[in-house]
Amino acid sequence: MKRALLSVSDKSNIVEFAKALVNLDYEIVSTGGTFKMLKEAGVPAIEIDEVTKFPECFEGRVKTLNPYIHGGILHRRDKQSHLDQAKELGVEAIDLVCVNLYPFKATIERTDDFEEIIENIDIGGPAMVRSAAKNFDSVMIVTDPSDYSLVLDAETNGTNTVEFRRGLMIKAYEHTAAYDSMIANYMNKRFNSGMGEKQFIVGNKVMDTRYGENPHQKGALYEFDGYFSKNFTTLKGEASFNNMGDINGAVKIAAAFGDENAVCIVKHGNPCGFAIRDNLTEAYVEALKCDPVSAFGGVVAVNGVVDRELAEKMNEIFLEVVIAGRITEEAQAVFESKKRIKLFEYGAERIVLSNDEKDFKHVDGGFIFQDADKVGDDEVKNSELKTQRAATEQELKDAEIAWKVASLTKSNCVVYVKNGAMVAVGMGMTSRVDASQCALKKAKDMGLDVEGAALASEAFFPFRDSIDAAAAAGVKTVIEPGGSIRDDEVIAAADEYGMALYFSGVRHFLH
């Protein structure tokens, strides 16, 4: 008869799993709440202290940290000396260990009581998981309830091979590594402002991408806290590595305005169209006007529901990706004729953002890590008017749109917005003047009138030349952080042209 040790915090399907193991001629050893649940369900089980010959003690802090448990797990079945010693010591083999750990994450989400948090740091659980994983040659380690059926199938069908157990072993070490990482990150957040001596970034794999940025690179998507698994649904096609980068840029901009009917078009990570309107079809039409050439083959994020009318309008050009709160079945039918289009939704009336607290970027030899950037709700409202002329209500609304879009556009950038739609954008330039001039040149080429537009720059203007260029184009309102040693010259230039100039006091570089 084989022996299984079951000790789980997540008790979903544990009774059914235990019953199936008994039917496969397993003897069950269990602890605490798991033992109680099994006994109440009529599953024959041995309580842990019958094996350890020692009572659970110190309010449950010590129950499985015992040679009869770890010896039963760790002794090698392929070494006669181990088998002889196990017999001599009265250590019985444990062939399957099913453990998942104290709910540390749920605890820190529920309470700030440090004593309760400390008590929800599992000690015996990780020790058993690591022991069983180390001896995977002979022991199955099960840490995920979704694997119960796979384990039972392996036992039933004779496929409990060393390769199968090796896969469980890898998953087990991922499990304990993620658990310890979560504890370390929490402690650093609580006591070291989140910037400890070690920083752990842990994600769960969602899918492989067809390849990475280029065909010779491998790629995959990982998630935090089940974000994509819970919210992101593929309706048509397959998201590539590059698609996911562009989707990230597009949805952050489209969803930056709450419940507004916003549409953002992105190409190669930067916005080439944006608009807010009373309905989404009008918003898409206005967004497309900014740069329809770049929009070809682009990613469109819709902060709302794509219906048949909007789908038919979108279908007039080639778009690679459409992502929205929802895409109706009628809209999906419209897109069916386009074989290469990819459709994704969040299953909600609006885009669902994760709003991660932290942000990081790979650099050669490591990564840089920071608090995530976000435009404050009152950032524009609280900006300081620096000129004699104040903006109108519509100009302020346009300035807010331009400011938020600029914060999510690669630096150096400038964004021009008129009547709720982006009419010009310059991004990723080494010079802010170049960004301004490129934006205005493209607007002119597209036949777009920027007269009366609001201009946002995510960082200060070091010279007055950008104000001169904006005035020549007819810009009436400018918002920027301020902070240049030549701020007085910039303010004087804005007054000279009768502009409204606002300083936000906050910079939003995006590199």
Image (cartoon, grey):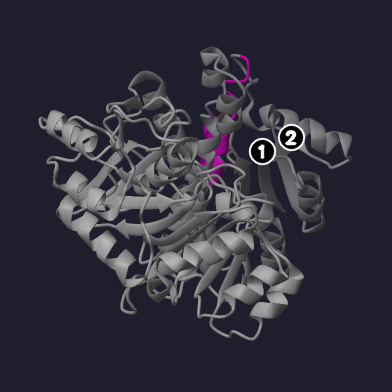
Q: Nearer the viewer, residue 33 or 238?
A: 238
Rendered image quadrant of residue 101: top right
Coordinates of residue 234 in the picture (x, y in percent)? 61, 67
When the figure is inspected, residue 436 is found, relative to residue 256, above or below; the finding is below
Coordinates of residue 319 in the picture (x, y in percent)? 50, 75
Q: Nearer the viewer, residue 436 or 190?
A: 436
Give the residues in magenta.
59-74
Query: Residue shown at 42%/56% (left/top)?
Result: 422
Q: Which residue is mark 1?
A: 8
Could you tell whether 278 is left or right of 404 in the image? right
Q: Which residue is mark 2?
A: 34
Amino acid beneath label 2:
Thr
Residue 71 in the magenta stretch? The answer is: yes
Residue 185 in view here: yes
When the figure is inspected, residue 501 is found, relative to residue 279, above or below; the finding is above
Query: Residue shown at 27%/55% (left/top)?
Result: 473
Mark 1 secondary-structure assignment: strand
When the figure is inspected, residue 69 is found, relative to residue 215, above or below; the finding is above
Q: Are marks 2 and 1 in contact (CB under 8 Å)?
A: yes
The earlier-in-sequence mark between 2 and 1 is 1
Amino acid beneath label 1:
Val
Could you tell whether 277 is left or right of 332 in the image? left
Within 10 Å of the Cα at label 2, are there few (<14), some (14-19), or many (20+) other Cα atoms?
Answer: many
Coordinates of residue 283 in the picture (x, y in percent)? 56, 59
Could you tell whether 406 is left or right of 297 in the image? left
Coordinates of residue 510 in the picture (x, y in percent)? 29, 47
Mark 2 secondary-structure assignment: helix
Query: Residue shown at 59%/84% (left/top)?
Result: 338
Q: Nearer the viewer, residue 214 or 499?
A: 499
